[in-house]
Image (tube, rainbow, N blue to C red):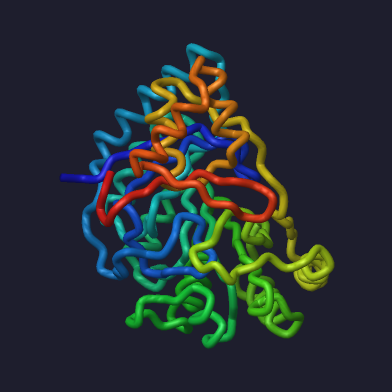
Amino acid sequence: MFFISIFGPVPSRRLGSSLGVNNIPYKICSYTCVYCQIGPTLRMETRRQRYSDPEELAARVKKRLLQLAETGERVDYLTIVPDGEPTLDLALEELLSRLKEMGIPVAVISNASLISKADVRRALFVADWVSLKIDALSQDLWKRIDRPHPSLDHDDILVGMEEFASFYKGTLCSETMLVKGLNDGPAELEKVARFLSTSLNPSKAYISVPTRPPAVSWVQMPDAETVAIAYAIFAEQGIDTETLTGYEGNAFVVTDDPIEEILNITAVHPMRSDAVKEVLRRKGYDEKSIDRLVSEGKIRRVRYGDWVYYVRVMKEGEQ
């Protein structure tokens, strides 16, 4: 049985209105990052296998696009952004090819852990927009932040990223998530910036901070001054840089059952309480609906900073 799920569109600070395509079962990943917004990885994996059914996923995306067209909703990107690492799916290349037939740009957000594999690079070449993660150049910090599968080699990943950038014809972006007290110091940031400018040359480098509840409770976002210094270090290397530190808004689009939609979205994208209330209000539901999901153990409340977030409760491999 293949994993099949779509969600949104959701508001994206990088991609506008993004219709999410989830091609990996819950929390199967090559990393278990300390800041992951959907919790710790349940199954560490680097072996690629077929997780999705591209034909069925493409059919569901097409159906959703027709629904959205009827209501005049805009979709800027079809985005492969699953519960785990999307390049673990052997069907990724076929899935991307089918999605591109719909005439909307297709994006993939990857942690880059498998980029040293030629077949992974070949699959990603199909996408219009690719984001590769690079949180640290130093191997010890990479291990502390991203907590990779033991078979992964950081140097191989960096070489693979450089190889991909040399041949990719689409829009290549990078993302660096800053964790207070770990990779937010000038020395490490200068290493990352030099690598980006000399080896990757991304169209844009995004500097992010954990804005949603992290997998590990001690993770904190750096202060505004630290983020500003990081921006300056990247910009000094001639890199087009943008910081992602704010809330993306509540423009979640729901076309079907709002309860099912909230469950699909929160499996990948934790929602702030005000966003959930707004989705329910637009469909004529009251707040008791979300209370029932909490009492049934399908969703949980998590306080992070000044806000309460809702996160889907799932088990390994669940759809």
Q: Is residue 123 above or below residue 182?
A: above
Q: Residue at x 48, y 35 (%)?
A: 19
Q: Looking at the picture, how far across and down is residue 120, in whole percent?
A: 36, 62
Q: Residue at x 68, y 82 (%)?
A: 188
Is the N terminus in the top left, top right, bottom left or bottom right quadrant?
A: top left
**Residue 192 or residue 229, whichever sits in front:** 229
- Residue extending farthest to the top is 70
**Residue 86 or residue 304, whichever sits in front:** 304
Q: Is residue 262 above or below residue 3?
A: above
Q: In the rendered view, does 49 fall on the left or right side of 269?
A: left
**Residue 95 or residue 29, whichever sits in front:** 29
Number of marks in the image?
A: 0
Q: Looking at the picture, how far across and down is residue 182, in whole percent?
A: 64, 79
Q: In the rendered view, does 114 fall on the left or right side of 221?
A: left
Residue 30, quarter of the rendered image: bottom left
Q: Looking at the picture, how far across and down is residue 52, in whole percent?
A: 26, 46
Q: Residue at x 28, y 44 (%)?
A: 319
Q: Is residue 21 above or below residue 149?
A: above
Q: In the rendered view, does 188 fall on the left or right side of 200?
A: right
Q: Looking at the picture, how far across and down is residue 211, in whole percent?
A: 64, 55
Q: In the rendered view, does 188 fall on the left or right side of 65?
A: right
Residue 141, quarter of the rendered image: bottom right
Residue 198, quarter of the rendered image: bottom right
**Residue 45 or residue 118, whichever sits in front:** 45
Q: Residue at x 56, y 15 (%)?
A: 72
